[in-house]
Amino acid sequence: MLASVLQSRAGRLLEGLNIMSATGGAAEHDPQALHRAWADYWRAYAADREIAFGAARRHSARVRWLKRAIVFGSLGIIGALAALSLINPFGALPGGFAIDRATLSGTRVTMDQPRMNGFRKDGRPYNVRARTGVQNVRNPGVIELNEIEARIEAGDNNTVNVIAPEGVFDSAADRLQLKAPASAGFITIKSTSGFDIRLRSADMNVKSGEMTSNDPVAVRMNNGTIDASRMEVRDSGKVIVFTGNVRSLIRPGGDAGEEDDTAPQAEGDRQQ
């Protein structure tokens, strides 16, 4: 660009000198005119030179910026792809896990309508769903769940429905830890065989169907009630063990007293 500017200026200078020569040698008889012509030329040259160098500097700066942008952009893309491949927040979760939508804020992933379907060890199906879930990408196998609903097939046409205000699912251990703060009511576990259980906490293995609660539990059945300080569910829900301050009330006779082969067996220290 600078060379073209100088060429243009030199051409105009020569053209001016030629004009003066053609008009009778004005350059020879008027040295001041020649001096003014050279002065104008050098002023224009200096101005054009500064403009050209400024444009060259700006061009060089743009080139340097583009080079840095390409390098850092490439590194950013590579880093993001590497991070996604390493983090993969859903890679640690079991098959059958799905969500409607997920948003990322820092290291926390918030999920809408997380749900999981699977089969227990005995081949019976189960499904767990929640209104929302929160996962930390640093520990992707653990999800904090809110407003949980679970449905478990217990066999002999018996279905168990679980509702809990909140809980934590650990995919590595297949465990669902249910919680019910005092302000949120109770965890409720209802079965089609007639059991209605209310408690504050429960540690459930979704694969085996085993469950433990170390908080007070209240059980309502077709033919009675059981209250205890602790409860343990064994053998895929076929056996329920109550311990600690166990109080039971059994009403024999009538429709409520008819034997139900599908109901779990209760064991424990019974005080009537």
Image (cartoon, grey):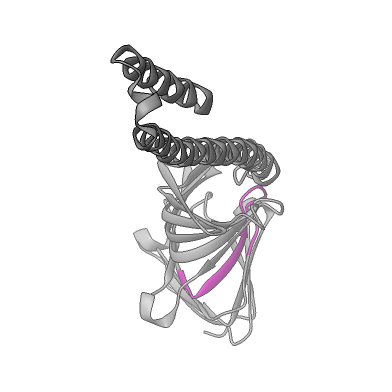
Of residues 33 and 201, the one drawn nearer to the viewer in this rendering: 33
State the residue lying farthest toward the left: 23
Q: In the image, is residue 95 above or below residue 83?
A: above
Q: In the image, is residue 74 above or below residue 108?
A: above
Q: Is residue 110 left or right of residue 121?
A: left
Q: Position of residue 67 (x, y in %)?
A: 61, 36
Q: Position of residue 177 (x, y in %)?
A: 58, 64
- Which span of residues is magenta-colored? 198-211
| Residue at 47%, 42% in the rendered image | 50
Q: Position of residue 82 (x, y in %)?
A: 69, 40
**Residue 36, picture quadrant:** top left
| Residue at 40%, 63% in the rendered image | 222
Of residues 128 and 39, the one drawn nearer to the viewer in this rendering: 39
Q: Can residue 125 be seen in this snapshot?
A: no
Task: Count every numbered label the image shows and give the total.
Answer: 0
**Residue 60, picture quadrant:** top right
Of residues 243 and 34, the one drawn nearer to the viewer in this rendering: 34
| Residue at 44%, 78% in the rendered image | 181
Q: Is residue 149 left or right of residue 69?
A: left
As for residue 141 lying within the magenta part, the answer is: no
